[in-house]
Amino acid sequence: MKILKCTAIIVISLFLLVIIASWLHYLLIADKTLEVVIVDKTVANFSRDGHSSLIWILNHDKYVNTRHKSYSLSQGYYGFYPLKPRSSLNFEIKRVLLSDIAEVSDKCDILYFADLYGIYANDWYKNKIAKGPSTKIIGGITFSDYSLLKFMLDNKKTVVIESVFYCEPTEPLNRYRTETALDIHPLGGEVGWSGRYFKCLDSTNSDMPHWIVQTYMKNNDAQWPFKKGGIVFLKGNSQAVVLEEGKDLDNALPQIETSKEIATRFNVPEQTPFTNWFELFTAGPNYRSIADFSLKVNSTGASILESNGIPAKFPAIFLDKNDKVFFFSGDFANQKIAYNTFWIPGWLSLKQKTMFHNESTAFLWTFYYPFISSLLNEVHQSLNAKINKNN
């Protein structure tokens, strides 16, 4: 018994020693200054999944802002702030003010639009207060958002935009201004196509949204004959197209295919599975696609897509000719992550090993992290080179 007790004490002591040594090692790594402005209007809980992975990367790679402060998961972004306790139903909203745009854009090195869909009253209050049609609390592109984006574009600064951008809450004039400034447009008109992979299409599956089933059944004789995995395409709430594995797809998992040149530049695989929402866009001549979504359709699936004007291969990342605007056609940053692990050395290499991730986490660790980390490093090095040149 005494030997077991001594062994336990030794093991616990060694574990604590490793933790302390790891933390001290992290603290001794030199900080790198980079001002990243984040906009996330769809923060429905305290885990802040819409931008938590981005904050994890910033802290893991030891970036601080121009005030020499570490990036905070719960502070330092523009958008919706839930207040504790959740049961209080209280919240705050931090907006980009028109009067501050020149100052913000001048300091900003990277502007990152994570999610602009927003928060609605019936969702936030869970029908305890709000009655009738749900009203918007926050969401969509405002004139201030457009103005900040325009400042960044005009000054050729780095902008990263995720697919949940041209969303319903945006007023038509702000939508027109923003779409014109970017020259990136939804495929299929004002309401474009969006889609997602589902591991199980069975309507009894709790992960299968009921409203998607209803949208499909509305135009298909009230039938939903799908049981296996597959991909659902939606055009707003009016049209749904379903491809099922084995019947229409050889492999239901969408893949992101990247050229060897881009894969090398951003340290990502040439092929990566993707399980989140994606959208289909077209872009003007100043852009090129540096990564594409590829669907493994058979002849039946190809025919269904063709009849609906949906390509089997479409851009996943647009990059403009100045290497400044990165437009992600998928919900890239919205990933569940153990945020407090950012300081642990070796955590990343551990998670990147195949045995430690599944189809839903592979994208985060093998694609999103190395891509964003490489992008941050490129911008940081470019800024340092400019400072050194001026000195």
Image (cartoon, rainbow, N blue to C red):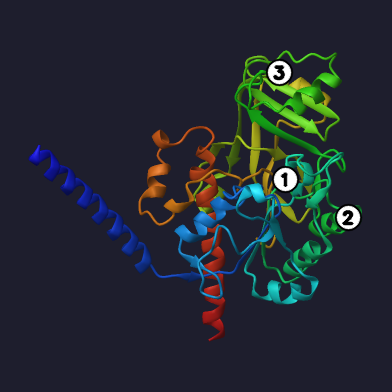
Q: Quadrant of residue 153?
A: bottom right
Cα–Cα gap, marks 3 and 1 = 44 Å
Q: Image check: 191 left or right of 197?
A: right
Three-letter residue code for mark 2: Tyr
Q: Which mark is residue 67?
A: none
Up/down of 175 relative to 222, above or below = below
Of badges 2 and 1, the one in the foreground is: 1
Cα–Cα gap, marks 2 and 3 = 38 Å
Q: Image check: 16 left or right of 278?
A: left
**Residue identified by numbered label 3:** 299
Q: Where does residue 260 sit, x and y in percent of width and height?
A: 54, 45
Three-letter residue code for mark 3: Ser
Up/down of 327 relative to 238, above or below = below
Residue lying at 62% horizontally and 45% vertically, measured from the top left: 332
Crowding at mark 3 (Cα within 10 Å: few <14, some 14-19, many 20+)? few
Q: Image check: 188 left or right of 87?
A: right
Labels 2 & 1 near each other (Cβ < 8 A) = no
**Residue identified by numbered label 1:** 124
Where disc 2 sits, the SS reads helix
Q: Earlier in the sequence, mark 3 or mark 1?
A: 1
Q: Where does residue 217 sit, x and y in percent of width and height?
A: 81, 19
Where disc 1 sits, the SS reads helix
Up/down of 54 relative to 272, above or below = below
Labels 2 & 3 near each other (Cβ < 8 A) = no
Residue lying at 82% horizontally and 39% vertically, measured from the top left: 192
Q: Earlier in the sequence, mark 2 or mark 3?
A: 2
Q: Quadrant of residue 155?
A: bottom right
Three-letter residue code for mark 1: Trp
Of badges 2 and 3, the one in the foreground is: 2
Where disc 3 sits, the SS reads helix
Q: Image check: 181 left or right of 58?
A: right
Q: Which mark is residue 176?
A: 2
